[in-house]
Image (cartoon, grey):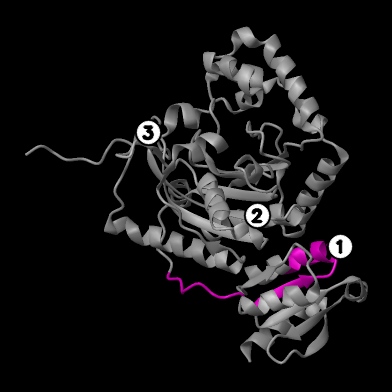
Amino acid sequence: MDKRTAPRGTFDILPTDSNRWLALERAVDELCARFGYGEIRTPIFESTDVFVRTIGEGTDIVDKEMYTFTDRGGRSMTLRPEFTAPTARAALEHNLLQNLPLKVYYRGPIFRYERPQKGRYRQSHQWGAECFGVAGPQADAEIIALGMELIRRETLADVELGINSMGCDVCRPAYREAVVAHLKDNATTLSENSRERLSRNPLRVLDSKDPSDRAVIATAPRVDSYLCDACREHFTAVRALLASMGITPTVDPKIVRGLDYYTRTVFEMSAGGLGTQNALCGGGRYDGLIAAMGGPATPAVGLAMGMERLLMAAGPRRAESLNGRPRTEVAFVALDEPSARSLVPILHAFRRAGISADMDYTLRKVDKQIRAAGQQGARVAVILGNDELARGEATVQDLTTRERQRVKLIELEHDVKERLAR
C-alpha cells in the first residue's frame, strides 16, 4: 500500500497536541470577550475579487501565494490568505457598520502557497481582531494591548513590540514622492518584481522580501520625517497610552505597509527562539480599506497573530483549563477625551485583574453609553468627566438599581470587586 501523507506545507494536530490548541483557542475567546470583541466566522473561500481589490495586484500574496480556482459556475474563487478582507466584506454585506464601533475577532486556517519552513506553512492558523469606527488613539492602544496580553498569558519572555506611523492622506503624498525618487535612482539594482511595482504602486516595493531589494529599502526615506502635526500627535498619544498600561514599544522606522489604505499606526510583535522567522503578530490602522471596498469612509485598526508561531515560541506546557466566555461586567463611560485617556490604564488594570470590562471610545452621550452597557449585560458603570477627574474620583452606577456613588480612583477596583461579589 502506498504511504499516504498530508500535503506538503500542512500538518495534522494529533490528540497529544490538541489540548494545547484548545487551551490557546479558549484563551483567545476569553480574552477577546473580556476586551469587548465578538467572534465572527467567515467562509474559508471567497470571490477572488475580495482579495485582489484589498490586498492588490503586485503583492506577493496576490501574484504568487493565493490558492485560486474556478468553480463549476465559472467563478474565480480563492482560499482565504488572510482575514481582514473577508471580515470587511461581511461587515459591508450585513450592514454591521451602521452601528459603530464594531469590534470583532476571528480564528481559523488561512492558505498561502509558499516554501514551507519552520513556522511557515501552506495551511496555517491565525487569530486576530478588528475595531471599526474609532479614529482615536485609544483603539490603536487597545488592539496592541490585546495582542500583548495574550502573549503575556502564554508566559512568553523576550518579546519585542515595534511600532511606527505611516502618516495619512495629508502627509503621505510627500513621503511617496521621496520614495519614488529614491527607487528610481536605484531602479537598476531592484528585483524584476519591484521594478514592475515601481510603475504601479511604488510603496509596495517597501514590502519586498527579495534579498536584492534589501539595500535599497534600507536606505529609503523614513516616513517619520514627513508626518504632519496631526499624525505626530496621534503617534505620540498611542505610545503614551501604551506606556500608561505598562507596555513599552520601540519605534522602528523599518516597519511599513505598502498598501495605500494603511494609515498612521503600524506595529509588529516578535519573539526570540524562532530564528529569522520571529514575527508573532502584525497589525495597524487601515482607515482607507472600507472605502476601497466601496463602503463609507470608516476608520479601522486590527491585528493578526500566527497561532503556530505562538505555540512554538511558548514551548511545551500543560494545557490550561479555562471556563466559558464571560459577559462584560463593568462599563467605563468617559464624558470627554481627557477622561477617556485617563480611563485607559484603569480599564486595562481591571482586565488584568480578571474583570470583564469595556469602554465606548466614541464618546456618545452618557445615556446611550449606559443603555448599551446594560444591553451587553454589564452590572456596573464607571463614569468619569472633568469634575470627577479634578477630584480624583469616579461615579460608580449600579445598573440594576440605578444608584450612583462617588468613589476615589485609588479605591475603585476594590469597590467594584465588592459590588460584583454581592
**Residue 386: in magenta span:** no
Can residue 354 be spotted in the picture? yes
Circle 1 packing at 10 Å, graded few (<14), some (14-19), many (20+), is: few
- Residue 415: percent from left, percent from top: 73, 84
First along the sequence among labels 1 and 3: 3
Residue 84 relative to residue 225: left or right: left
Seen at 44% across and 27% down, the residue is: 64
Q: Secondary structure at mark 3?
A: loop
Camera sees residue 156: no
Locate the N terminus by quadrant.
top left
Residues packed near mark 3 inside 10 Å, few (<14), some (14 to 19) or many (20 plus): some
Using the rendered view, name the quadrant where residue 283 is placed.
top right
Residue picked out by circle 3: 116
Q: In this rendering, which labeled residue sits more in front, label 1 or label 3?
A: 1
Could you give the CA–CA distance between mark 1 and mark 3, rounded to whole angstroms? 48 Å
Q: Determine which quarter of the picture holds residue 245.
A: bottom right
**How far is the residue under mark 2 from the one under mark 3?**
34 Å
Residue identifier under label 2? 132
Report the amino acid beneath label 2: Phe
Identify residue for label 1. 338
Task: Report the residue at 87% width, 72% height from top.
Answer: 385
Q: Under tag 2, what secondary structure?
A: strand
Magenta segment: 321-346
